[in-house]
Image (cartoon, helix red, strand yellow):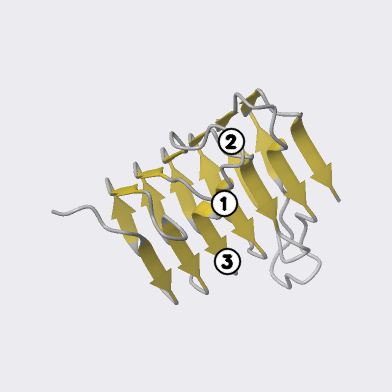
Amino acid sequence: MPTPSYVGMEYAGGANVSHISVTNPADYGFYLEYGSRNLVTRCTVDYKGTDESYYTDEEVGDTLSWDTAKDTYSSDGNGGYGFYDDESAHNTFTHNTSTGHEYGFYLYEDGYGSVTATHNTATDTHSSEYGFYVYYAFPYFDYGPPTRTGISHNKTNGFEYGFYDYT
């Protein structure tokens, strides 16, 4: 199978994507938008750019596990985002690795719901911005059953700020 230029999923529900490698995509490595209950596991993105390796936008209940986001091309530390979760609810990031990105895990929920991040690792060698950035990860707009954001057993190394929570 040839290497894809990116993996895009819009309005997908219950998809299971595994063992896909994306090298140097134009914008995103993986792009998930407006879907729910999708699983992305054991995939790799090696990305030279300032966008996101893995981008989830307004997704509900997705799981990204055992995935790798790396930037082996940039030498200045402006390698964009490893994992970017935007205005989503109840997504889970577990056992993932981000290496060489300006932001390792950028979880920008903006009040749409909770997020869970466990056993992830963010590493940078350029003293870039944030290993883990969590923004308004609570169910302000989520009318479902109450849930809590869980950030535990994560590791960060080489960032200006290891963990940042704006709630």
Report whether residue 92 is seen. yes
- Residue 41 placed where, x, y %? 37, 46
- Residue 48 placed where, x, y %? 46, 45
Residue shown at 71%/48% (left/top)? Answer: 149
Mark 1, residue position: 50
Residue shown at 76%/29% (left/top)? Answer: 160
Q: CA distance from mark 3 to mark 2?
A: 20 Å
In which quarter of the view is residue 103 placed? top right
Q: Earlier in the sequence, mark 3 or mark 2?
A: 3
Is 44 on the left or on the right of 69, as rendered?
left
The one of 131 and 80 positioned closer to us in this rendering? 80
- Residue 158 placed where, x, y %? 66, 23
Q: CA distance from mark 1 to mark 3?
A: 17 Å
Q: CA distance from mark 2 to mark 1?
A: 25 Å
Question: Which residue is outermost to the right?
Answer: 167
- Residue 57 placed where, x, y %? 58, 66
Q: Earlier in the sequence, mark 2 or mark 1?
A: 1
Q: Nearer the viewer, mark 2 or mark 1?
A: 1
Question: Which residue is outermost to the bottom?
Answer: 11
| Identity, as a three-letter code, of the amino acid under mark 2 | Thr
Residue shown at 16%/54% (left/top)? Answer: 2
| Identity, as a three-letter code, of the amino acid under mark 3 | Asp
Q: Are marks 3 and 2 in contact (CB under 8 Å)?
A: no
Q: Secondary structure at mark 1?
A: loop
Task: Using a 10 Å C-alpha cutoff, classify the residue at mark 3 as few (fewer than 14 neighbours), some (14 to 19) or many (20 or more).
Answer: some
Residue 57 is marked as 3
Mark 2, residue position: 118
Q: Are marks 2 and 1 in contact (CB under 8 Å)?
A: no
Task: Using a 10 Å C-alpha cutoff, classify the residue at mark 2 as few (fewer than 14 neighbours), some (14 to 19) or many (20 or more).
Answer: some
> Exactly how many numbered labels are in the figure?
3
